[in-house]
Amino acid sequence: MTPPITIDANDRTPIYAQLERGIRVAIATGRLRSGEQLPTVRQLAVDLRVNANTVAKVYLTLEREGVLVTQRGVGTFIADNVPASAHAGHRERRLHAHIDRFLTDSAALGYSPREAVKELTRRLKEGEN
């Protein structure tokens, strides 16, 4: 079974976050469909050359959110009806990460958070005109 996602060793994003994002994107783009079986934790870890505990952690997180379903002794599958709320939390976490990066990059350029937000607000108003 070919892994449905890849890990970029040069990406500063933690491996578990890349793996979680990769599975979600594969579902959203149709590369993984409802009911489709995922590789075992061990097999995906070997294929991606990552720690099996990392894969297990991601599978468990996605299972708790209703994205995956695990059948003991059979395997892990994409849930038939992935709840919209499962994607909402993920979207919110990604937005928070973008905001953190924006504020960090702004600080590196010498801007305070207030100055950065003020400029962002100005740009938004500019775009409304």
Image (tube, helix red, strand yellow):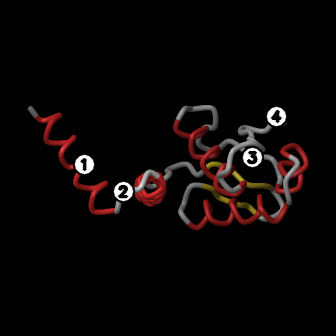
Give me the C-alpha separation between circle 1 and circle 3.
45 Å
Image-based side of 79 in relation to 83, left or right? right
Mark 2 or mark 1, which is nearer to you? 2
The residue indicated by pointer 4 is 2
Asked if disc 2 and disc 1 are in contact, CB closer than 8 Å, the reply is yes
- Near mark 3 (Cα within 10 A), the count class, few <14, some 14-19 or many ≥20, is many
Where 34 falls versus 57 (above or below)? above
Give coordinates of residue 76: x percent, y percent.
73, 54
Answer left or right for 59 relative to 29: right
Q: Which residue is mark 3?
A: 38
Of tags 3 and 4, the one toward the viewer is: 4
| SS assignment at label 4 | loop
Tell me the amino acid under the disc marked 1: Glu
Q: Is residue 81 above or below residue 129?
A: below
Q: Which amino acid is tagged 3?
A: Leu
Of the two numbered discs 1 and 4 in the rendering, the one whose residue sits closer to the viewer: 1
Q: Nearer the viewer, residue 53 or 13?
A: 13
Disc assigned to residue 111: 2
Pointers 3 and 4 in contact (C-beta within 8 Å)? no
Question: Gap between marks 2 and 1, in whole Å?
Answer: 10 Å
For the image, the number of numbered tags is: 4
Tell us which disc is closer to us: 4 or 2: 2
Residue 106 on image: x %, y % = 41, 53
Mark 4 and mark 2 lie on one chain; the one further toward the N terminus is 4
Q: Nearer the viewer, mark 3 or mark 2?
A: 2
Counting other residues with Cα less than 10 Å from the Cα at mark 4, is it few (<14), some (14-19), or many (20 or more)? few
Check disc 2 and report its element: helix, strand or loop: loop
Decide which of tag 1 and tag 3 comes sooner along the chain: 3
Position in image of residue 11 (x %, y %): 69, 45
The answer to which quarter of the image holds residue 10 is top right
Q: Residue at x 80, y 47 (%)?
A: 39
